Structure formats: structure tokens, C-alpha cells
Image (cartoon, rainbow, N blue to C red):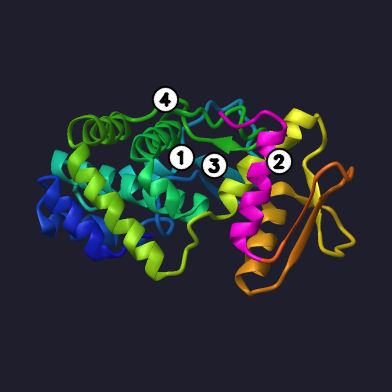
Amino acid sequence: MPSHEVHRHCAILLGIRGSIAEFVNNLIDFKCEKHDVGLEHIISKNRRDSPFGLPPWYVCADISATRGVEALVRCLQDYGKLDDEYLKAAALHLLLDCFDRMIGYFGTWISFEKEKLCSACYERIEKAVKEPLYPLYINICVERLEPSEYAIKILNHVYSFINFHRNALNKCIDLIKHEKVLKRVPEVNYGTFTDMLSDLCEKLNIKCLFYVDNSLKSLSVLAATKKVVSELRRGRGVTLISADGSIRVEARTLKEFTDKLMQLLEQHGLLD
């Protein structure tokens, strides 16, 4: 996640008081139900009774699910901080966290595609706010289907940042990218390779399972690309082979692996 210095600097750029940003940053990172609460749903085990006021005829299982954004709203409510500037600070925190995750997942190149990055993060946060947990989680206690008014306000602030404060957000994206470079996140990371290989699998109409080097067990495309990147960053050559043998890539560096995947995409008409 971005450092608290980046969170605070970006909050000030967007007209949020530094003290409020720091309070919300600490709340989200350390004092709510979960570290970095907000972007993911929270699954709780061993709860027989629903805390969400479900109809009495609903039978609860041993686990329950709640939206992370609603957990964040309840956390803010517990501290009496549901006024607009705190909601705005929470919205910015979620947005910056999303930028950070996307740059870490795809690689630092995505920081140059700021329009795409902002659009993807808005969609992710909108999904976190509005996506019904049922039928995502079957046979467990789920949160009420409608998002709260405060969750909607958080989403509206995200929309406002992206559509009316793009210059400030672009500076924040560059700051996050700089931190990622210092942490040695590569220019092209496993998320990009995952997307490239998934497109190839779809084009070839094959199952997206792979072997890396002499592994005895096939891996999902995400697990395989993570292993490939890990090995290449250690200076070890790798061979990636699809389970059916139709895709084979040998490389000794990340650049070579990237170039060979690009060649495969071009060969199969998947590049514009």
C-alpha cells in the first residue's frame, strides 16, 4: 500500500486536511475489522447468528460475509466520524490503495495509462460498494443487499476525484509509481502476463493451465506467471508450457519473456 506520507500529501492536494487524512489512514490500516478494510468483502467464520437483521426464515451457516466498504462505514460510525470530510478522506484512501495494487499487479507501465487506471479503480470500488453478496456467497449469512447511504457517498467522492481532480490524481499516481520502483516492482509484472496468456488461451480455445520448468503439477495462469516472474527476477531461466503443449515460452530475462509473449499475441492476431 502507499506510504502514509503519500496518502497525506495526496489528501492535501485534493483539499482534505492533513489531520483528517492521518486519522482515516490509521483507522483503515489498524483500527477496523481488517487491515486495509474497504476494497474486499470480509468473510467471518463460526458465526451462527446473523448480525445483519436477515429474515428469521433464513438459515445461517458457520460463516458470514459483509462488504468491506460497509465495514469501513461502521468503523467510521464507531468513532463518530461520518461527516463529509471523513468520508472524502476514506474515498481517497480506497482510491490510492487501488492504484497501488494495480501498479503492483500489472507493473509500473500501467502508471502511464492513467485514464485506464482511474477507470479500472472506479469500477473496482463501485463493485465493492454495490455488488450483491448473494448469490456470490451461497448458504451463508450475507449482508443486506442495498449499500448504505454513506457507502454511496464514498463512491460519489471517488467519482468526483476521478472526473474533476484528474491533475492532482495524476501526481498521486506518479508518487505511488515512484514508491513501487524503489520496492523493485518490475515494469511488467505477473498481472500483465496473466492477461496476455488468458487472451491466448481464449483465442486457442484451450484450458489455461501451465507447467513451469519440470513441475509435475499444472498451475493456474496466475500461479504460473507469479512463478515465472519470481524465477526470472532471481536470474534463473524458465520454460512455460501450456497443459496441451500449444503454448511454449523459454526465457532468461523478463524482457525476453515479454517480447516472446508479444510475438505470440501478434502471431495470433491479438495485438491492435
Mark 1, mark 2: which one is toward the viewer? 2
Q: Amino acid at mark 1?
A: Arg
Stretch in magenta = 253-272
The residue indicated by pointer 3 is 65
In the rendered view, does 81 fall on the left or right side of 26? left
Q: Position of residue 102 (x, y in %)?
A: 45, 48
Q: Earlier in the sequence, mark 2 or mark 4?
A: 4
The residue indicated by pointer 1 is 67
The residue indicated by pointer 2 is 264
In the image, residue 258 lies in the stretch drawn in magenta: yes
Q: Residue at x 58, y 28 (%)?
A: 134
Q: Amino acid at mark 4?
A: Glu
SS at mark 3 in the image = strand
**Which of the 4 image quadrants contains residue 195?**
top right
Q: Position of residue 33 (x, y in %)?
A: 42, 55
SS at mark 1 in the image = loop
Q: Which mark is residue 146?
A: 4
Measure how far apart labels 1 and 2 are at the Cα level.
40 Å
The N terminus lies in which quarter of the figure? bottom left
Mark 3, mark 2: which one is toward the viewer? 2
Q: Residue at x 19, y 48 (%)?
A: 80
In the rendered view, does 169 fall on the left or right side of 262? left
Measure how far apart labels 1 and 3 are at the Cα level.
7 Å
SS at mark 4 in the image = loop
